[in-house]
C-alpha cells in the first residue's frame, strides 16, 4: 500500500528534456505557463496543442504513462468544462436551452479552450519539470535561481539544504512507517475496519513512534553533519556544477519562437468570436 | 507446545511486475514445538521474510503454513487470531513504544485481544517480571528509560499477549554484552518455564550456540540446513558456504585438533570448552 506512492514522479530517461539544465527547465516552464494564457484564437490553441505534443515526443515518455498522470485532474477538467458550457452568456442566438440552462456557441468554444489550456498546462509543466527532473536537481535549480536573495541576507542555501534533506528522508520515513505498522499489527492493531474515528484512533500507536523516530533521525543527522564540520552555506563549493550548454540556449530559443508564433496566431482572423 | 509447519512456501515481493524479487523459494520445514529454534542466514537470505510469514504479516505467494494442524490462511479474515497466537518481536522493538506509561504500553496488545480486569493486570505484571522490569518502572514514561530497558518493555508488550509461539528478530541487537545475556537469558527462562515454542533470529553464532536447541539455516532464499545444534554445526563446510561461521570456540577446538590435540570438536560454548579441556588435563595428569 505505502510502497505504491511514487515520489516526485520522476521517470528516468536520457531524452533531450532529461539532460537539459534544470535551471533552464525551471525558467522555461514559467515562460511556457505564462505564454499559454495569452492564447486567444483557435489557431493559437491549435498551435498550443501541437507544441505540447512535440514536447511529449521530445520527452520520450509513453502516452500511457502521461494519461495516467492526467487522470487525477480529470474531474477538474470536467467541472471547468461544464461550468463554462452552461454559464457563458452571449448576445448571439443560443444553440439550445432547457430548464434554467442556455448554451451559446461561445460557451462551447470557451469550454473546449479551457480544457485544452489546463491540459497543456499540466502536461507541459509536468513534462518539463516533475517527470524529467530529479527532485535533487530541482532543488539545485531553485537554489541557484534564488541565489541573488543571498545579498538580502536570506539564507537561500540553508533553505535548499532543508528541502533536499526533506526529500531525502521521505522514503526512509515511509519505510519506518511500514515497520511500525507491522509491529503494531503484530500486537493486534486493526487499521482497516471500524468507523472513521476508530480508524483515526488506531493510527495513534503509529504516529507517535513515527514522530519520535523522525526526531531521533534528525538529531543523529545533525550530529553527523556537525562532526564533519558542516558550517552552513557560505563559501561551500559543489560536487556537481551546473553549466549551461549550447543545447540549453537552443531550447530557450525554441521556446521564444513558440511564444512569438503563439502571439502571431492570435492575429490570424477567424470566424469564431471569443 | 505447538509446532509450525511450512509446506513448499515461496514468497516474492511485488509479484508479476518488473520489480519482482524472490525472498523465499520452496521452503518446507517443521519448527519443533517446545524448543528454541534459531534462524540464521546471511543478510538478505530471507530470514525476516520467513519470520513475518509465521504470524501472517506476509502471505505466501504459494505454499501453506500450518500452526499445529490449522492452515493459518484458511480464513484470511481471522488472521488477527493467528497474530495473537504467534507473537512477533521485531528488530529494534523499542521504536514502536508510544504510550504514556510502561504499564499502558505493555497493555496495548492484550487490550486489543479483549483482555480486561484482573486477567489483564496479571498478564502485564507477569510479562514485566519475565523481562526483568521492576514494579516502580511500570508507572514511568517509556521514553525516560534507557535503550536496554525500552527493549525489555517492548518485548514484554508481546509476552503479555501470552502467545503460544514467540518469534524474535534479533532481540539483542545493539545491546552491550551484559544486556544481551540478560535478555536472551530471560527468553530462555520464559521458554523453559512456560514450555513455549520460540523462534530466534540472530547473526551471532555464539548466541545461537548458547540459547537454541535447533537451527534452521537459510541461504539465497532457500532452506540450506535444519537440525539440532550438533547436526548443523558438524557441517562446517556448508555453513561456511552460506557465508556464516561456526562459533568462535568451535573454531578454536577445530584448530587444536588440526594441530594434533585429540579434542572433541562438538563444543559450542566457552563454558563447555573450558570444562572439556580442564577434564582432559585432569585425566591426563
Image (tube, rainbow, N blue to C red):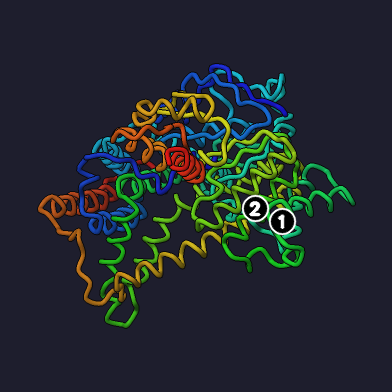
> Does A196 sit left or right of A63 as displayed?
right
Marks 2 and 1 close (CB-CB < 8 Å): yes
Asked if residue B249 shows in the view, the reply is: yes
The residue lying at 49 percent from left, 40 percent from top is B279
Question: Dividing the image into 4 quarters, which one contains the N terminus of chain A?
Answer: top right
Tell me if mark 1 has few (under 14), some (14-19) or many (20+) residues whose alpha carbon lies within 10 angstroms of its own.
many
Q: Whole-percent x and y of residue B13?
A: 47, 30
> Does B35 sit left or right of B16 as displayed?
right
Q: Which residue does the numbered mark 2 point to in the structure image?
A: B154
Dot 2 or dot 1, earlier in sequence: 1
Q: Whole-percent x and y of residue B192?
A: 70, 39
Q: Is residue A167 above or below residue B185?
A: below
Find the residue positioned furthest to the right: B118
Q: Whole-percent x and y of residue B216?
A: 51, 29
Q: The residue tagged with tag 1: helix, strand or loop?
A: helix
Q: How many marks?
A: 2
Find the residue positioned furthest to the left: A246
Q: Which residue does the numbered mark 1 point to in the structure image?
A: B105
Asked if residue A73 shows in the view, the reply is: no
Residues at marks 2 and 1, common chain?
Answer: yes
> Does B136 sit left or right of B117 as displayed?
left
Which image quarter: residue A54? top left
Find the residue positioned furthest to the front: B285
Using the image as rendered, state which of residue A74 and residue B188 is in the foreground.
B188
Using the image as rendered, state which of residue A93 and residue A243 is in the foreground.
A243
Amino acid at each position: 500500500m505505502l510502497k505504491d506512492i511514487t515520489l516526485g514522479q520522476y521517470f528516468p530517461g536520457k531524452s533531450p528534456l532529461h539532460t537539459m539544465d534544470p535551471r533552464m527547465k525551471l525558467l522555461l516552464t514559467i515562460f511556457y505557463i505564462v505564454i499559454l494564457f495569452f492564447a486567444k484564437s483557435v489557431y493559437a490553441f491549435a498551435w498550443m496543442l501541437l507544441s505540447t505534443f512535440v514536447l511529449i515526443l521530445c520527452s520520450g515518455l509513453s502516452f500511457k504513462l502521461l494519461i495516467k498522470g492526467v487522470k487525477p485532474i480529470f474531474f477538474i477538467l470536467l467541472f471547468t468544462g461544464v461550468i463554462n458550457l452552461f454559464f457563458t452568456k452571449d448576445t448571439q442566438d443560443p444553440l439550445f436551452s432547457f430548464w434554467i440552462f442556455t448554451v451559446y456557441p461561445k460557451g462551447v468554444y470557451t469550454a473546449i479552450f479551457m480544457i485544452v489550456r489546463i491540459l497543456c498546462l499540466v502536461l507541459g509543466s509536468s513534462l518539463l519539470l516533475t517527470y524529467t527532473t530529479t527532485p535533487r536537481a530541482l532543488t539545485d535549480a531553485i537554489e541557484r535561481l534564488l541565489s541573488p536573495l543571498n545579498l538580502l541576507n536570506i539564507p537561500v542555501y540553508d533553505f535548499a539544504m532543508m528541502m533536499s534533506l526533506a526529500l531525502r528522508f521521505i522514503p526512509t520515513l515511509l519505510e519506518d512507517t511500514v515497520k511500525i505498522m507491522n509491529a503494531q499489527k503484530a500486537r493486534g492493531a486493526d487499521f482497516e475496519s471500524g468507523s472513521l474515528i476508530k480508524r483515526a484512533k488506531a493510527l495513534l500507536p503509529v504516529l507517535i513512534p513515527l514522530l519520535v523516530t523522525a526526531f531521533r533521525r534528525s538529531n543523529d543527522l545533525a550530529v553527523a553533519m556537525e562532526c564533519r564540520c558542516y558550517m552552513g552555506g557560505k563559501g561551500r563549493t559543489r560536487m556537481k556544477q551546473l553549466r549551461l550548454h549550447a543545447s540549453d540556449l537552443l531550447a530557450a530559443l525554441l521556446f521564444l519562437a513558440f511564444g512569438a508564433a503563439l502571439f502571431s496566431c492570435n492575429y490570424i482572423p477567424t470566424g469564431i468570436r471569443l | 507446545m505447538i509446532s509450525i509447519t511450512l509446506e513448499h512456501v515461496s514468497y516474492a515481493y511485488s509479484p508479476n511486475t518488473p520489480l519482482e524479487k524472490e525472498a523465499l523459494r520452496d521452503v518446507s520445514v517443521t519448527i519443533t514445538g517446545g524448543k528454541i529454534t534459531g534462524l540464521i542466514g546471511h543478510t538478505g537470505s530471507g530470514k525476516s521474510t520467513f519470520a513475518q510469514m509465521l504470524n501472517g504479516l506476509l502471505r505466501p505467494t504459494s505454499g501453506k503454513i500450518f500452526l499445529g494442524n490449522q492452515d493459518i490462511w484458511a480464513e484470511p479474515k481471522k488472521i488477527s487470531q493467528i497474530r495473537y497466537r504467534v507473537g512477533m518481536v521485531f528488530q529494534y522493538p523499542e521504536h514502536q513504544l508510544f504510550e504514556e506509561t510502561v504499564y499502558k504500553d505493555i497493555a496495548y496488545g492484550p487490550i486489543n485481544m479483549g483482555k480486561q480486569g484482573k486477567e489483564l493486570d496479571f498478564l502485564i505484571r507477569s510479562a514485566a517480571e519475565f523481562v526483568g522490569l521492576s514494579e516502580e518502572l511500570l508507572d514511568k514514561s517509556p521514553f525516560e528509560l534507557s535503550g536496554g530497558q525500552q527493549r525489555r518493555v517492548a518485548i514484554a508488550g508481546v509476552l503479555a499477549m501470552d502467545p503460544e509461539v514467540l518469534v524474535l528478530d534479533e532481540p539483542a541487537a545493539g545491546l552491550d554484552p551484559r544486556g544481551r545475556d540478560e535478555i536472551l537469558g530471560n527468553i530462555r527462562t520464559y521458554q523453559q518455564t512456560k514450555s513455549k515454542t520460540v523462534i530466534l533470529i540472530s547473526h551471532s553464532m555464539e548466541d545461537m550456540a548458547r540459547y537454541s536447541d535447533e537451527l534452521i539455516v537459510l541461504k539465497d532464499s532457500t532452506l540450506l540446513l535444519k537440525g539440532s545444534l550438533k547436526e548443523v554445526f558438524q557441517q562446517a563446510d556448508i555453513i561456511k558456504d552460506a557465508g556464516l561461521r561456526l562459533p568462535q570456540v568451535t573454531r578454536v577446538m577445530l584448530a587444536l585438533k588440526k594441530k594434533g590435540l585429540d579434542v572433541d570438536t562438538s563444543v559450542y560454548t566457552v563454558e563447555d570448552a573450558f570444562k572439556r579441556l580442564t577434564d582432559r588435563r585432569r585425566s591426563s595428569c
